[in-house]
Each structure stands twice: as C-alpha cells, then as structure tokens.
Amino acid sequence: MLTRIAVPGDARDVARLISLAYRVEDFFKIGDRTNEADVLARIKKSAFLLIEDDAGKLLGCVYVDIRGETGYFGMLSVDPSRQGQGLGSRLIAAAEDYCRTAGCHQMELEVVNLRTELPPLYRRFGYVESGTRPFFDHEQAKLPCHLIVMTKSFGPGA
C-alpha cells in the first residue's frame, strides 16, 4: 500500500470516496458530504493524504490543514468494503505526522454530535473533547446538530 498527497487530478475520485464513506450520515444530512469542486479547492489550499493499494486503487483519504501551530484533520474516509483493516488508523497517523513535520504542536478535529460512536473512537487515539462549534451547513441538516471539537497535544508530557 502507498500513502501519498493528492494532486488535482485525484479530486473526482476523492470526492466519490468521501461521499460513499459518509453515506452513514444520511440519517441526519441531505446530500453528499462533498463534491469534486470542493475537494479540488481543498487540494489547492491544503492537502488530502491518500492510501492506495498496489494497483493504485484509492482505499482511503483524509484532509489535513495547517492552522498556525495547530493541525486539523477531517473527512477521514475509508472505502466501506475495506473498513476494519486499520486503514483509518494509518490515515490518522499520517495526518498527525504531516502536521507534526509542519511544526504543529497539537491536532484538532470536529465530529457531529449525532455520530455518537466517534468521540470514543478518537479518544483511543488520544483526542479529548475541547469545545463545540455550530454545524457548518444547517440547510443540509435534517436534525438539529452541532460539532464537537476534539484536540490532541504533541508537546512534552502529551
């Protein structure tokens, strides 16, 4: 398996994978999680890290952004047919390494409060709840919701 940074030509496949992986959110969200134009804009602004099989098939991706000394990751997506094989863990580690190398001292992520299985998952990777934010697209939400912010420090004693 290969991990690499996405290039603009990957935008369509990345958007397709994210939308497929995020079908689990259909119970509260209308429409796809993202689209090719959004992914392309994010590739140009920051980065997507990809995991591919030996034949070059996209298996998973994660969006990473450097925000000063804080790294951010989101849109963690693994092909549903490949979930449970450690690819998500590899992508989280790659996102943390990417941001640590860029000089970040902590990582941040956001999860929708309605995805109650996610905070315990990210706690296993050392993330803790640190606040809330409004949901980014209320017009797409079928149910009231908000974002839970989770952070992890890279500093000494972390």
Image (cartoon, rainbow, N blue to C red):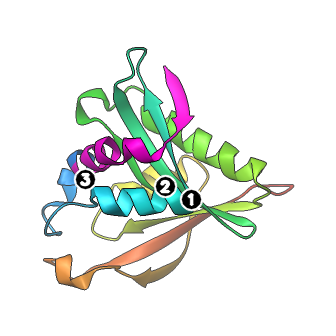
Snapshot quadrant of residue 150? bottom right
Identify which residue is drawn at 23% across, 29% down. 81
> Residue at horizontal 74%, vertical 50%?
100
Q: Identify the residue under disc 2.
A: 43
Q: Residue at x 36, y 48 (%)?
A: 11
Q: Assign a secondary structure to mark 2.
A: helix
Foreground residue, 42 or 145? 42
Whole-percent x and y of residue 32? 19, 60
Query: Residue 104: x, y in percent?
Result: 75, 59
Does the stretch in magenta take in 153?
no
Coordinates of residue 21 in the picture (x, y in percent): 26, 46
The residue tagged 3 is 22
Which residue carries the number 1 mark?
A: 46
Residue 30: which numbered mark, if any? none
Q: Find the residue positioned furthest to the right.
A: 156
**Most distant residue in the front direction:** 9
Asked whether disc 3 touches disc 2, contact meaning CB atoms under 8 Å apart, the reply is no
Q: Which residues are magenta?
A: 1-19
Residue 147 lies in what quarter of the image?
bottom left
Q: Residue at x 13, y 69 (%)?
A: 30
Q: Are marks 2 and 1 in contact (CB under 8 Å)?
A: yes
| Camera-nearest residue between 106 and 55 | 55
- Crowdedness near tag 3: few (<14), some (14–19) or many (≥20) residues, C-alpha within 10 Å: many
Q: Quadrant of the C terminus?
A: bottom right
Sequence-wise first label, 1 or 3: 3
Q: Main secondary structure of the magenta part?
A: helix
**In-image side of 45 versus 59 (left or right):** right
Disc 3 residue type? Tyr
Q: Would residue 24 be found to the left or right of residue 46 on screen?
A: left
